[in-house]
Amino acid sequence: MLYNKALKDYKKLQSDFGQKLKLLRERQNLSLRDLAARCELDFSKIGKIEAGQTNLKLSSIFELAKGLGVEAKELLNF
Amino acid sequence: MLYNKALKDYKKLQSDFGQKLKLLRERQNLSLRDLAARCELDFSKIGKIEAGQTNLKLSSIFELAKGLGVEAKELLNF
């Protein structure tokens, strides 16, 4: 999936990432607080990420991957 | 590879990402300016990212992937 900055597609990119994160979290029956307890991110921040409201950083991607016990690249697999 | 915030490993994470980016860029015989011309990032910013000096954002990862013509998850494959 290509995201073209000219078309301000980053909202779509953030939304796609958020949906993938939510899918992976729910597949493991983890609540936002469960996931937050496993990584260095606050549950409210994870909620905003899932809602597509955050252009998150590389370190946050790896924190989420750590919390989910998956490889970081899996979170970009959409 | 797990990066533990407590151990301030983000420098290592940024460095690993930068090396992977440089490897993929040089494999295609692209200069920093060549790559910058193919995506929405300035060549000096790409240089800083390769030097491990940037905790870059999700959108920048996708811009770099677009510029290299690879899937974004490939950039996290290290």
Image (spheres, coloured by chain):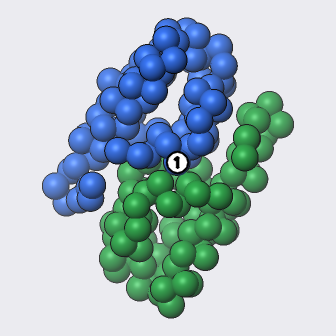
Chain colours: A green, B blue
Q: Position of residue A10 (x, y in %)?
A: 71, 45
- Write down the quadrant of residue A65 in the picture: bottom left
Image quarter where the C terminus of chain B lies is: top left
Compared across the picture, whether A41 is left or right of B6 comes to right
Please tell me whether residue B61 is drawn above or below residue A28 in the rendered image.
above
Query: Given the image, what chain letter belongs to the residue carrying mark 1?
Result: B
- Write down the quadrant of residue A36 in the picture: bottom left
Q: Position of residue A42 (x, y in %)?
A: 42, 71
In depth, the one of A12 and B78 nearer the eye is B78
Q: Position of residue A51 (x, y in %)?
A: 67, 68
Secondary structure type for disc 1: helix
Residue at image coords 75%, 53%: A12
In depth, the one of A48 and B48 nearer the eye is B48
Residue at image coords 59%, 16%: B36
Please tell me whether residue B7 is drawn above or below residue A44 in the rendered image.
above
Would you say residue B57 is visible in this rendering?
Answer: no
Mark 1, residue position: B73
Toward the front, the furthest residue is B27
Residue at image coords 35%, 67%: A66
